[in-house]
Image: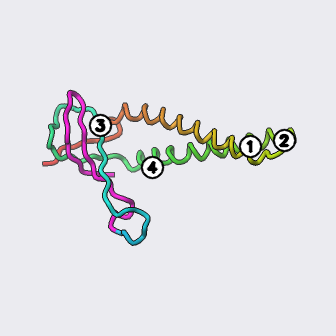
């Protein structure tokens, strides 16, 4: 995956890079109502390797396999958390002949979903510390 960006700030050993994100369809189809049709800006904070300055245009590159891996993590962990909560609660509550075990199982699934979001937050902090190992930044002329 390649994106172009602009260094908008340099603060010590940190860079802020402005990247324009596009929707999956390219953001040009207002009629589908699936997106607003607008490109969305994103500011990435990365470590400075000393070669870039404010105002430089850069190309950010990330392996497609890395993008797919992190996308899968973001979607699969919450789903697994929810299903695990529902199944475990159903098995335990059904065994003890609890009334309304379906509703309680649903609530337990939602609690597990919430816990999985905290797990994702921890993964995000760990990954964001190693941004330069994931992204390749190249200065454009």
Magenta residues? 1-28
How far apart marks 3 and 2 lie (CA) works out to: 51 Å
Mark sitting earlier along the chain (4/3): 3
Mark sitting earlier along the chain (4/2): 4
- Discs 1, 4 touching: Cβ within 8 Å: no
How far apart marks 2 and 1 lie (CA) works out to: 9 Å
- Discs 2, 1 touching: Cβ within 8 Å: yes
- Which of the labelled discs sits on residue 68, or is there none? 4
Mark sitting earlier along the chain (1/3): 3
Q: Residue at x 24, y 31 (%)?
A: 14
Q: Crowding at label 2, few (<14), some or many (≥20) Cα neighbours within 10 Å?
A: few
Q: Position of residue 107 (x, y in %)?
A: 68, 43
In front of the other: label 4 or label 3?
3
How far apart marks 4 and 3 lie (CA) works out to: 21 Å
Q: What residue sits right under mark 2 in the picture?
A: 98
User: Element at badge 3?
Assistant: strand
User: Element at badge 2?
Assistant: loop
- Image quarter for residue 78? top right
How far apart marks 1 and 3 lie (CA) works out to: 42 Å
Mark sitting earlier along the chain (2/1): 2
Q: Crowding at label 3, few (<14), some or many (≥20) Cα neighbours within 10 Å?
A: some
User: Element at badge 4?
Assistant: helix
In front of the other: label 4 or label 2?
2
Q: What residue sits right under mark 3 in the picture?
A: 45
Of all residues, the one furthest to the left in this rendering is: 141
**Residue 5 is covered by the magenta coloring:** yes
Q: Residue at x 36, y 69 (%)?
A: 29
Q: What residue sits right under mark 1 in the picture?
A: 104
Of all residues, the one furthest to the top in this rendering is: 12
Residue 8 lies left or right of residue 96; in this view the side is left
Residue 84 lies left or right of residue 27; in this view the side is right
């Amino acid at each position: 995956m390649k994106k172009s960006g602009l260094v908008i700030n340099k603060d010590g050993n940190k860079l802020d890079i402005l990247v324009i994100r596009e929707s999956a369809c390219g953001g040009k189809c207002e009629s589908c109502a699936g997106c607003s049709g607008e490109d969305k800006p994103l500011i990435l904070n990365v470590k400075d390797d000393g070669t870039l300055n404010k105002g430089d245009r850069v190309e950010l590159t990330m392996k497609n396999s890395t993008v797919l891996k992190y996308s899968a993590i973001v979607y699969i962990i919450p789903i697994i958390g929810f299903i695990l909560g529902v199944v475990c609660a159903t098995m335990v509550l059904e065994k003890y002949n609890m009334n309304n075990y379906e509703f309680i199982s649903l609530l337990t699934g939602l609690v597990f979903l919430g816990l999985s979001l905290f797990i994702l937050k921890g993964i995000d902090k760990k990954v964001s510390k190693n941004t330069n190992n994931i992204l390749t930044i190249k200065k454009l002329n």
